[in-house]
Amino acid sequence: MAAQPSPGPPLIAVAHGSRDPRAAATVEELLAGVRRARPGLDARAAYLDHAAPSPASALAGLDEAVVLPLLLTAAYHSKVDLPAALRAASARRPGLRVRLGAPLGPHPLLIAALERRLAEAGVDIGDPGTAVVLVSAGSSDRRANAVIAQVAEAWARLRPWWSVTPAYASAAAPTPEEEVRRLLGAGAPRVVVAPYLLAPGHFSDKVRQAALAAGAHRVAGVLGAAPELVTIVLQRYGEALEAAPAAVGGEAPAAVTA
């Protein structure tokens, strides 16, 4: 019988972290999907804040790993926080070698996942009478916010929606409620909200409540463990494997660009 191919080095999927237990449960559900799709792969969760384990703890006992940020844009957490956490891990285990992958987004499959969640909420996909508000958490990094605007523009070109426009739950304008009200005032027959968020928690609850209060027709669920995200995680893992591993001592590991 032919030998089975190696599943590859362990995958450490690093999420932002939340005090809300629904967030960690969602990450674990996503990784369970990854393990089903890639039998034998050692896929572990880690968190930058508010939850355990930390990246250093998740890497304990390993000589090599692929570290993937479970983040939807390249912003402060992926550019600063995660490399710093990996440098801290090297202090515990000299010689540890990692391949640092790209954030999950942007990626074309994320639009498919967003549409999946809208359909689950009862939205007719591509309806010309429906305006979509794409809501991200928001960032102090203007480039990260600009990526959300670009995703909205790409989605608007893909489908005959009334419009697709961005909004931000924090740190940038417009807020979801501001954008919902603007669109209704501009004559949009219906306005729906698509959260560009990985897991439920403070931001998702805030977005839902504010958007509905402003008159939104539907608010979709978060991306969560959608099958499209499983595919993206494995693609980012494969891309990272193609890069040379880097020691995490004095400099941040090289990242695979999206």
Image (cartoon, rainbow, N blue to C red):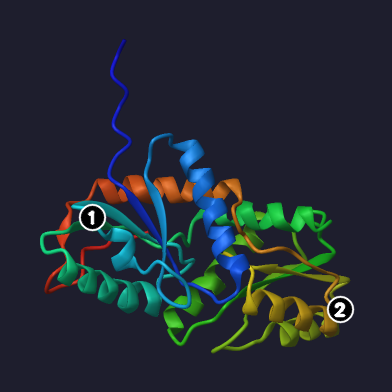
Is 232 in front, or is 157? 232
- Placement of 34 over or under 184, stated as above or below: above
In the structure shown, which secondary structural element does the residue marked by tag 2 occupy?
loop
Q: Position of residue 31 (x, y in %)?
A: 49, 50
Q: Is residue 118 left or right of residue 148?
A: right
Residue at the location (56% across, 56% down)? 110
Instruction: Identify the amino acid type marked 2.
Output: Gly
Q: Is residue 161 left or right of residue 6?
A: right
Is 196 in front, or is 106? 196
Residue lying at the far top in this picture: please name it. Answer: 1
- Placement of 174 over or under 109, stated as above or below: below
Instruction: For label 2, count other residues whose C-alpha is less than 10 Å away and answer few (under 14), some (14-19) or many (20+).
Output: few
Q: Quadrant of the C terminus?
A: bottom left
Is 12 in front, or is 137? 12
Residue at the location (21% across, 63% down)? 254
Which of the 4 quarters of the picture holds residue 42?
top left
What's the CA distance linking mark 2 and mark 1?
A: 59 Å
Q: How many marks?
A: 2
Q: Quadrant of the N terminus?
A: top left
Q: Is residue 140 visible?
A: yes
Q: Position of residue 236 (x, y in %)?
A: 38, 51
Instruction: For label 1, count other residues whose C-alpha is less than 10 Å away and answer few (under 14), some (14-19) or many (20+).
Output: few
Is 198 in front, or is 185? 198
Q: Position of residue 86 (x, y in %)?
A: 25, 69
Q: Position of residue 239 (x, y in %)?
A: 32, 48
| Mark closer to the chain start, 2 or 1 | 1
Q: Is residue 166 visible?
A: no
Instruction: Identify the amino acid type marked 1.
Output: Gly
Residue 187's disc is: 2
Which of the 4 quarters of the picture holds residue 23?
bottom right
User: What residue does disc 1 label?
Assistant: 61
